Amino acid sequence: MNTPTKHGLAAGDAGRPTNADWTVPQGWARYTAQEHAVWRTLYQRQMALLPGRACEAFVQGMRDLPMDAEQIPDFERLNAVLQPRTGWQVVAVPGLVPDDVFFTHLANRRFPAGQFIRRPDQLDYLEEPDVFHDVFGHVPMLMNPVMADFIQAYGAGGLRAQSLGHLDMLARVYWYTVEFGLVREAGGLRLYGAGIASSYTESVFCLDSPSPHRLGFELARVMRTRYRIDDFQESYFVLDHLDDLLRLAQVDFAPLYEATAELPTLAPGDVLASDRVWQRGDGRYHTVRRTSSTIGT
């Protein structure tokens, strides 16, 4: 992958589609009974788990979309509801796409979603985002005007960050918001990030485990913070309100890139004296994982 965001894939790593924008037909009629069954399993267990964990915007988006347990959603039916609401549409792609293609789609309110679904033996972990992650995890939040505007701004900002050579910093903002963000709501913390909402195990870990840190979201801080692509996050960043994303969408990142480039990057589990700490984790989960990985080496 050419960036740590998991947006992009170098051309040639997978068959390049004929279309320059990498879109392909969803091919909904070709899904097998087993593939619909995998969707059903994933959908039912997340819907049983997320009440009281997911933010209201996610819950409302799920209520309003033509999405249920019985079958993988048809993108055309989703778009018939989504596009009139926020101007977004879901387009099918074969998997990860090059960064410039990804950003261009987002900047034009098109969300590229993998049209394949994981195998039954991959229910709890899949390296490449599939239709469950992309549609169940992301699309409900695209029904919310705040998230809809933020992700479009991220797409435009991604193209600019590429030209300035600072895509890594902007990618961290996306990771700790759109993919793994938490928000204060109903007197506690709720998840809104798609990487959490589509993961049974991380939906529990992010809110219940004593291991990770839950820290107040500060833009410059997040831009410096590396993240985990191979395991649960060591830190989650908490928005005071989902509307805070609107302010981020209006930020001129160019001077921030220059200032942040002068500072050292931070490890995923670092806690700074300046951090607003919701809950300081004990780090036990990742300590055990690091210890066990060195045994026998």
Image (cartoon, rainbow, N blue to C red):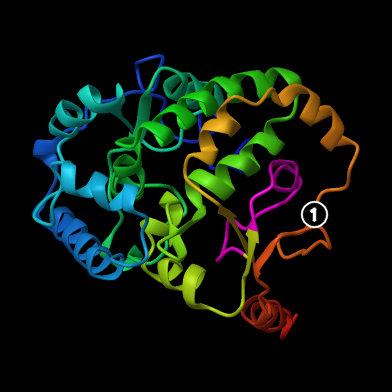
What residue lies at 27% left-to-right and 53% top-to-bottom? 59
What main secondary structure does the magenta stretch of the protein show? loop
The percent coordinates of residue 147 (x first, y second) are 42, 36
Amino acid type assigned to the residue bearing label 1 in the image: Leu
Position of residue 224 relative to residue 154, above or below, is below
Residue projecting furthest to the top: 20
Q: Which residues are magenta?
A: 216-233
Position of residue 220 relative to residue 285, above or below, is above
Q: Is residue 7 visible?
A: no
What residue lies at 28% left-to-right and 66% top-to-bottom? 51
The percent coordinates of residue 261 (x first, y second) are 85, 35
What residue lies at 36% left-to-right and 30% top-to-bottom? 111
Q: Which residue is mark 1?
A: 266
The percent coordinates of residue 144 (x first, y second) are 34, 37
The percent coordinates of residue 236 (x first, y second) are 59, 60
What residue lies at 56% left-to-right and 41% top-to-bottom? 174
In the rendered view, does 99 fall on the left or right side of 138?
Answer: right
Give SS at disc 1.
loop
